[in-house]
Amino acid sequence: MAIKGGGGDDSKVAKAQEVLRTLAEKEGIALAYVGGLGAIYHGYERNTKDIDIVVAQEDLDVLIRVAPVYGIKVIWRDPQGWHKLDYRGVKIDVVPEGKKPRPDAPTTIPSPKQLGVAQGAGYAGLAGWIETKLRSNRIQDKADVVQVMKVTSAAALAKVRSALSKVHRFYLRRFDELRAAADEEKEQERERGGLR
């Protein structure tokens, strides 16, 4: 899969993904891609120069221990698991299962398995990806969700909404707000000559 703005399949990001995929397979751990890569995977054509991966709590130490074997530098080892890695200039941010992305988040980060990645390295499913974005609640995260919603079918969004209703009502409220914003933007774009 080409990374928009990253130079295609030969990009630095794609090479870093390949190394992470090899590491995950050989070491028997699961890594779930979220963040900007997830936005691209789910249909939003945007640029990204880094990689965000959700890692299971029990695999955090393994990842840090074996990363150098695969040419991945450990830039920062965080006691809570929010490690910072680098592969040839590509920043890799570790998102640890069981931690809160911000103090006011009502729930913790789910495991890669809960995000749809039982083994190896793969993309979080749509519901899980949106859930991680809603947990962070940053401006860029909201914008990514709105853009993905604009290119996602109503049926798929209904499934996401149903999944979020089982997580926490706070995320459901955020989802509904962003869905309304996405619908409003789509209508504006139609009036101006079509979706971009």
Image (cartoon, rainbow, N blue to C red):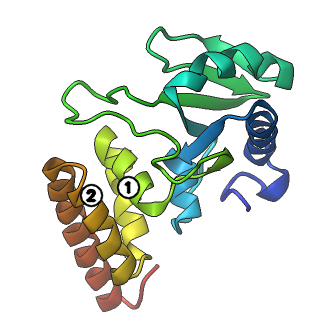
Q: Position of residue 3 (x, y in %)?
A: 69, 56
Mark 1 vs 2, N-terminal side? 1
Q: Nearer the viewer, residue 130 or 89?
A: 130
- From the viewer's perspective, is the residue at label 1 or at label 2 nearer? 2
- Please name the amino acid that badge 2 sits on: Leu
In the picture of the structure, the residue carrying the numbered disc 1 is 130
Q: CA distance from mark 1 to mark 2?
A: 9 Å
Q: Nearer the viewer, residue 14 or 4?
A: 14
Q: Which quarter of the rendered picture does the N terminus lie within?
A: bottom right
How many neighbours does mark 1 have within 10 angstroms: few (below 14), some (14-19), or many (20 or more)? Answer: many
Q: Is residue 159 left or right of residue 85?
A: left
Report helix, strand or loop for mark 2.
helix
Residue at left offset 25%, top offset 50% = 167
Q: Are marks 1 and 2 in contact (CB under 8 Å)?
A: yes
Residue at left offset 18%, top offset 65% = 176
Q: Position of residue 110 (x, y in %)?
A: 40, 40
Q: Position of residue 174 (x, y in %)?
A: 19, 55
Task: Please determine whether, in this image, residue 79 is positioned above or below residue 40.
Answer: above
Q: Nearer the viewer, residue 162 or 141?
A: 162
- Please name the amino acid that badge 1 sits on: Ile
Residue at left offset 66%, top offset 59% = 4
In the picture of the structure, the residue carrying the numbered disc 2 is 164
Q: Is residue 138 visible from the viewing direction of this image?
A: no
How many neighbours does mark 2 have within 10 angstroms: few (below 14), some (14-19), or many (20 or more)? Answer: many
